[in-house]
């Protein structure tokens, strides 16, 4: 069994999400302009969900062809790879923080918890129990990849409905405040990152379920496409209007913001994101490849680009906070960070092509491509809810 060629649109989408994240992470005017441009949904949701869909697609196909052991080995090998990259980058960052924080107050502030408890952080970082700011996305992938084989196996035995039901219950529980967890984290000097794992697992499980299901059948009946598209489009439009202040404030109670929390993936935020997913699945843009080739380049080298952008963001943030820079200077720094991603991606692409060996089903989820896209899968995400079976 083989998957068909990659579709540049999905690589371009991953590249766009990387650009948005880099712009948001630098405290420049770009951070405000790129903060949730698509409504009450951020690049992080799209990044995680897209990786999950492709993981379900690719690893589901491996499971069907080669069985559980082969599939599990592939998934855990990818988890090990992502974990290694995370550990390398965060260790270097912590070493630099311990070395130079005394002369760079913004650096000391960024790694405040790590500097306050250096021995604890040294022990907890490899366990993914200490995640400095900006270093909490890759641990999500590692954790979710590790449980993916069991998700696929359980769904094969009991069906996705039961798996999704359990996942939804866990997500619902995460919406409730838990002082016990908070107190325990403080006492043990844990820093579990901004993302609530219990909440965000629902996004991952849903993506895995969608990707694997579309190997076998359509998800939504064709006769319901038009009605659901109308509802989804209305939700997307409403989210855009409200997010960008174009909806009358009197019609938008402030209490609704409590239902849109990013870190616990609030209900209205989840609804907004789901509407976007459906709209993109239905919409089938015919885009010229040459126009989006720079973004495609980023998308094909997602892990390298993501890891590379972290020290750039921290260095840029230190410069902006240390010096009284003008609006134009801060904007230039933000643009420079984004621009630096492209030559780095080009260099990685060059090295990857030199070392390319034939064969292999593409690996999903934050490999040197975050998750390779098949033409079939791109059609599913960008152009249709019905999926064709993989070519043999």
Image (cartoon, helix red, strand yellow):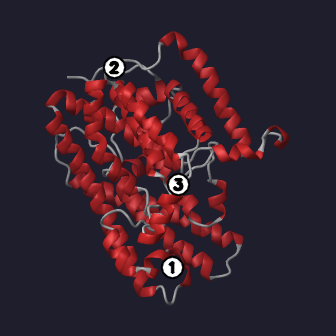
Whichever of callouts 1 and 3 sits on the residue coming sooner in the sequence is 1
In the rendered structure, which disc, 1 or 2, sits on the residue that comes first in sequence? 1
Q: Nearer the viewer, residue 309 or 255?
A: 255
Q: Is residue 269 left or right of residue 343?
A: right
Residue farthest to the bottom, as pictured: 103
Q: Secondary structure at mark 2?
A: loop
Residue in the picture at 73% in, 45% down: 255
Locate residue 386 relative to residue 24 in the image: left or right. Answer: left
Mark 2 or mark 3: which comes first in sequence?
Answer: 3
Local packing at callout 3 (Cα closer than 10 Å; few below 14, some 14-19, many 20+) is few
Q: Number of labelled discs?
A: 3
Provide residue 77's location: percent of width, then percent of height. Answer: 21, 50
Say few, some or many: other residues with alpha carbon within 10 Å of mark 2 (under 14 / 14 to 19 / 20 or more): some
Q: Position of residue 385 (x, y in %)?
A: 45, 22
Q: Which residue corresponds to mark 3?
A: 178
Asked if the residues shown at circle 2 and circle 3 are in contact, with their CB atoms under 8 angstroms apart, the answer is: no
The residues bearing labels 1 and 2 have C-alpha atoms spaced at a distance of 50 Å
Percent across and percent down for residue 384 are 46, 22
The circle drawn on residue 388 is 2
Name the image quarter holding the N terminus. top left
The crowd level at tag 1 (other Cα within 10 Å; few <14, some 14-19, many 20+) is: many
Q: Quadrant of residue 87?
A: bottom left
> Where 293 falls versus 184 (above or below)?
above
Circle nearer the viewer, 2 or 3: 3
Figure quadrant of the C terminus: top left
The answer for how far apart the CA atoms under marks 1 and 3 are is: 30 Å
Query: Which residue is denoted by mark 1 in the rendering?
Result: 107
């Amino acid at each position: 069994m083989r998957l068909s060629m990659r579709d540049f649109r999905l690589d371009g989408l991953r590249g766009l999400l990387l650009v948005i994240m880099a712009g948001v992470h630098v405290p420049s005017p770009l951070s405000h302009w790129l903060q949730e441009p698509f409504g009450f949904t951020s690049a992080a949701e799209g990044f995680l969900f897209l990786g999950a869909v492709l993981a379900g697609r690719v690893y589901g196909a491996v499971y069907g062809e080669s069985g559980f052991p082969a599939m599990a080995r592939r998934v855990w090998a990818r988890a090990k790879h992502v974990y290694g990259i995370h550990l390398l980058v965060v260790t270097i960052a912590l070493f630099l923080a311990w070395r130079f924080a005394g002369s760079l107050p913004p650096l000391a502030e960024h790694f405040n918890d790590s500097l306050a408890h250096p021995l604890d952080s040294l022990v907890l970082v490899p366990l993914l129990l200490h995640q400095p700011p900006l270093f909490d996305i890759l641990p999500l992938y590692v954790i979710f990849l590790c449980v993916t084989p069991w998700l696929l196996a359980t769904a094969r035995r009991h069906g996705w409905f039961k798996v999704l039901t359990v996942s939804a219950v866990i997500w619902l529980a995460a919406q409730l405040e838990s002082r016990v967890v908070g107190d325990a984290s403080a006492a043990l000097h844990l820093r579990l990152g901004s993302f609530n794992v219990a909440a965000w697992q629902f996004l991952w499980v849903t993506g895995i379920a969608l990707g694997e299901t579309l190997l076998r059948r359509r998800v939504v009946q064709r006769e319901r496409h038009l009605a659901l598209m109308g509802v989804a489009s209305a939700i997307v439009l409403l989210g855009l209007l409200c997010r960008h202040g174009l909806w009358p404030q009197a019609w938008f109670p402030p209490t609704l913001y409590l239902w849109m929390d990013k870190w616990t993936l609030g209900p209205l935020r989840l609804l907004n994101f789901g509407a976007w997913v459906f709209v993109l699945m239905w919409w089938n843009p015919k885009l010229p490849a040459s126009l989006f080739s720079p973004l495609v380049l980023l998308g094909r080298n997602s892990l390298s680009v993501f890891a590379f952008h972290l020290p750039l963001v921290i260095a840029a943030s230190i410069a902006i906070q240390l010096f009284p820079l003008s609006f134009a200077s801060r904007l230039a720094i933000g643009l420079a960070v984004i621009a630096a991603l492209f030559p780095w991606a080009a260099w990685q692409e060059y090295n990857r092509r030199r070392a390319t060996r034939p064969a292999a089903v593409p690996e999903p989820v934050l490999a040197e491509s975050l998750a390779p896209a098949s033409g079939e899968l791109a059609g599913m995400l960008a152009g249709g809810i019905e999926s064709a079976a993989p070519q043999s």
